[in-house]
Image: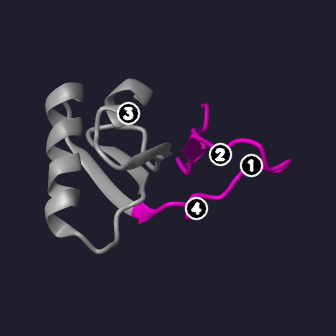
Amino acid sequence: MEVIIGDIPDTTLIYQLILDSWDMEMLELKVETVRKLPDPQYQREIKSTLESRLEIPVDVEVVSAGTIPMAPGGYKVIKVVDKRPKKTSL
């Protein structure tokens, strides 16, 4: 993921992958940029790049640099946010 995002101009290389369902039919990402937002064309370019390189549908939210919060301790961001409902075993 880092390589693909690094190939996109003006990203900060900071992103989050959000997991909100178990089916994983679409990848949900937040990607930081240094560009002034909103920039719909830039968002479409990022979406297109990610989908063509990953070969899966992507729902991408482009956010301003510094938007994605750091993990406790403040040195790294939480790259994967798992919001999936807990599976129950029978």
Residue on which the image places disc 4: 66
Which of disc 2 and disc 1 is earlier in sequence? 1
Q: Main secondary structure of the magenta part?
A: loop
Q: Amino acid under label 4?
A: Gly
Q: Check the image and name the residue furthest to the right.
A: 73
Describe the element under mark 4 as helix, strand or loop.
Answer: loop
Above/below status of 70 relative to 6: below
Quarter in which the N terminus is drawn: top left
- Neighbor class of circle 4 (other Cα within 10 Å; few <14, some 14-19, many 20+) is few
Q: Give the spatial CA distance, label 4 vs label 3.
A: 17 Å
Residue on which the image places disc 3: 6
Quarter in which the C terminus is drawn: top right
x then y, percent, for residue 51: 18, 37
- Neighbor class of circle 2 (other Cα within 10 Å; few <14, some 14-19, many 20+) is some
Q: Is residue 23 left or right of residue 53?
A: right
x then y, percent, for residue 36: 34, 71
Q: Is residue 12 left or right of residue 85?
A: left
Q: Amino acid under label 3?
A: Gly
- Neighbor class of circle 1 (other Cα within 10 Å; few <14, some 14-19, many 20+) is few
Residue on which the image places disc 1: 71
| Magenta-drawn stretch contains 83 | yes
| Magenta-drawn stretch contains 37 | no
Residue on which the image places disc 2: 77
